[in-house]
Amino acid sequence: MIALTFLAIAMEATMTQTLILLFHPDLSRSRANAALIGAAEAVPGTEVVDMQARFPAGLDMARDGEAEAARLIDARQIVLQFPLYWYTPPPLLQSWQAAVLTRMMYLLPDTEGAALAGKRLMVAVTTGGEADAYRDGGRNLFPIPEMLAPLRATANRCGLAWSPHFVLHDADNLSEEQLDAAARSYAADLVVWRAESRPVLAEA
């Protein structure tokens, strides 16, 4: 039993604890997402991948699917971070789903797809609108959870455990102080989330 405990600890040490896939069309022109990522990168055990910088022309299943599937398998928990544009994620996220999740869930479900089961997924979103616009009957008609419903359905299909989302509203109009506070809050949420999802190791 002691050997199994040490093995579990060793396996955990080699895994990316939190993998953040950032889907922003141009991070160099971002205030909010750049601030959030800057704070997140300081959290130990966190890997951030700027997907737009890595895949400017989109993802291809044959070319990119295997490596990106391995990235998901190697992570303990996954964050999809993006700005909400016209009530949907950027197109690159859809390209990622088509290339990576289709491979894992439909072509290799018993190996790669099965490896996703139970991993936790968080969505981190920025919006240009004020929080009051995202409510039943508000200017945008629907609250954020309803706008994220397709991603929640995707998580369900993949066996991923849906976690409470992080949202930063009115991102373009925040002061530096407000943005710094939001970034620190995001990093703190990631720390708590990681602690909550640590596996229970077998007792000696």
Image (cartoon, rainbow, N blue to C red):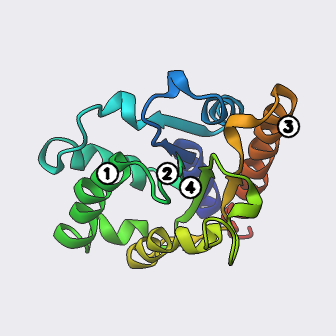
Q: Residue at x 51, y 74 (%)?
A: 149
Where does the C terminus fall, quadrant-wise? bottom right
Q: Which mark is residue 96?
A: 1
Residue type beneath disc 4: Leu
- The residue where tag 3 is placed is 181
Q: Residue at x 42, y 35 (%)?
A: 25
- The residue where tag 4 is placed is 7
Give left or right: position of 28 versus 71: right
Give left or right: position of 161 versus 105: right
Of the image marks 4 and 3, the number of the one nearer the N terminus: 4
Decide: few, some or many residues near mark 2? Use Cα within 10 Å; few <14, some 14-19, many ≥20.
Answer: many
Quarter-wise, where is residue 166 in the image?
Answer: bottom right
SS label for mark 4: helix
Q: Is residue 159 above or below residue 171?
A: below
Of the image marks 1 and 3, the number of the one nearer the N terminus: 1
Question: Farthest residue in the left direction?
Answer: 62
- The residue where tag 2 is placed is 75
Residue 46 is situated, as x and y percent measured from the top left of the image, at: 61, 39
